[in-house]
């Protein structure tokens, strides 16, 4: 069973950048695809980006394409989400999640087996 811990959230102004990290432990990291999701107050948790086990298959939600970049460093058991050109609509709690089907990232939360506790991102206008 893998444990996930997110970090890197914070308060930034519109147009700024942040890099989120998701550190994994307790399992064989390369056995998992990893996804990023976010949930704003009063809204459903939504898919943001996902990375397969090797990092060569990455998918994005339309709302973040061209602004966010997902990657992973298997030597460090860590997945990253580089977020550029942030806007207030990106304000949410961001979660990473691991999927036992390692070949491709899923785009719905039901496809993921393990979740981190989240990191808060707040973007002011």
Image (cartoon, grey):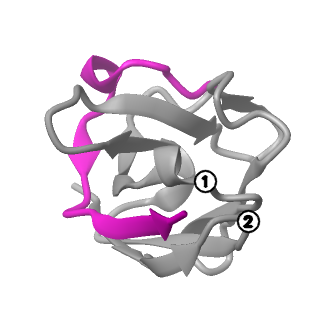
In front: 66, or 31? 66
Q: Is residue 49 visible?
A: yes
Judge left or right: residue 118 versus residue 78.
left
The local crowd at label 1, few if under 14, some if 14 to 19, many if 20 or more residues have their Cα within 10 Å, is: some
x and y, in percent, of residue 1 in the image: 21, 55
42 up-or-down from 108: above or below: below
User: Mark 1 highlights which residue?
Assistant: 87
- Which sits in the foreground, 39 or 59? 39
Q: Identify the residue shown where x is 61% and y is 80%.
A: 76
Farthest residue in the front direction? Answer: 125
Span of residues in magenta: 104-125
Q: Tell me the quarter of the image containing the C terminus.
A: bottom right
- Judge from the rendering whether residue 109 lies leftward or rightward of residue 59; answer left or right: left
Location of residue 75 by image quarter: bottom right
**Residue at point 32%, 69% (across, down):** 119
Task: Confirm whether the magenta stretch covers residue 19.
Answer: no
Q: Residue at x 62, y 26 (%)?
A: 61
Q: Position of residue 92 (x, y in %)?
A: 34, 53
What is the number of the mark on residue 15?
2
């Amino acid at each position: 069973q893998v444990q996930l811990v997110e970090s890197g959230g914070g308060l930034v102004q519109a147009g700024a950048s942040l890099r989120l990290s998701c550190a994994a432990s307790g399992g064989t990291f390369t056995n998992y695809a990893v996804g990023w999701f976010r949930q704003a107050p009063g809204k459903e948790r939504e898919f943001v980006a996902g990375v397969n086990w090797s990092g060569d298959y990455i998918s994005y939600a339309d709302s973040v394409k061209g602004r966010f970049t997902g990657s992973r460093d298997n030597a460090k058991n860590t997945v990253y989400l580089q977020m550029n050109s942030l806007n207030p609509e990106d304000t949410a709690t961001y979660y990473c999640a691991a999927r036992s089907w390692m070949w491709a990232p899923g785009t719905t939360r039901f496809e993921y087996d393990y979740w981190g506790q989240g990191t808060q991102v707040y973007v002011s206008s």
